[in-house]
Image (cartoon, rainbow, N blue to C red):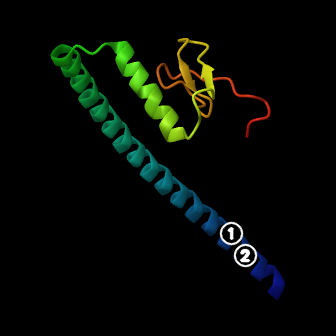
Amino acid sequence: MFYSSLSGLGLATTKGQAAYDVDEARADASEAKSEADLLKHDVDRLMMISEALWAFLKKERGYSDDDLAKAVGAIDLRHSGADKDAQEKCPTCGRMVSAHRRLCLYCGSPVPQSLFEP
């Protein structure tokens, strides 16, 4: 009958839409991977520049790693808007990290959060 021929058409359209959605999802995933690869490259380059600058400052000005850690901690507190008392101790490296951080700035380990924090 007439209605049975229409029902097959609807199934083909659904399959066609599903194939289109799969292709679109693959393209989106490929684009996201490309963007992530570019960001990784940028981070690697900035890390190398930072390491070179730090080596230069240590050699030319006599700064220590502790001086750098204190400066990073002060900047972290200033950017977070937290006061100096709002810090957590990293369970892995033992350094103090702003309480709003989920990962330690120094070693990258997760910092335990309060159960009542959002």
Residue ID at (36%, 21%): 68
Residue ID at (82%, 84%): 3
Q: Quadrant of residue 45?
A: top left
> Dot 2 corresponds to which residue?
10
> Dot 1 corresponds to which residue?
14
Q: Nearer the viewer, residue 63 or 97?
A: 63
Query: What quarter of the picture does the C terminus occupy?
Result: top right
Residue kind at label 2, given as amino acid type: Gly
Tell whether label 2 touches label 1 (CB within 8 Å). yes
Report helix, strand or loop for mark 1: helix
Residue ID at (62%, 68%): 17
Q: Nearer the viewer, residue 12 or 18?
A: 18
- In three-dimensional space, the C-alpha distance between marks 1 and 2, rounded to whole angstroms, equals 6 Å
The x, y position of residue 84, in whole percent, is 57, 28
Residue kind at label 1, given as amino acid type: Thr
Q: Nearer the viewer, residue 14 or 26?
A: 26
Q: Quadrant of residue 11?
A: bottom right
> Is 110 displayed left or right of 6 in the figure?
left
Q: Decide: is 58 above or below 98.
A: above
Residue 57 shows up from this direction:
yes
Query: What quarter of the picture does the N terminus occupy?
Result: bottom right
Count of numbered badges drawn on the protein: 2
> Is 24 displayed left or right of 58 in the figure?
right
The x, y position of residue 94, in whole percent, is 56, 11
Find the residue positioned furthest to the left: 60
> Is 60 displayed left or right of 102 in the figure?
left
Q: Nearer the viewer, residue 76 or 111?
A: 76
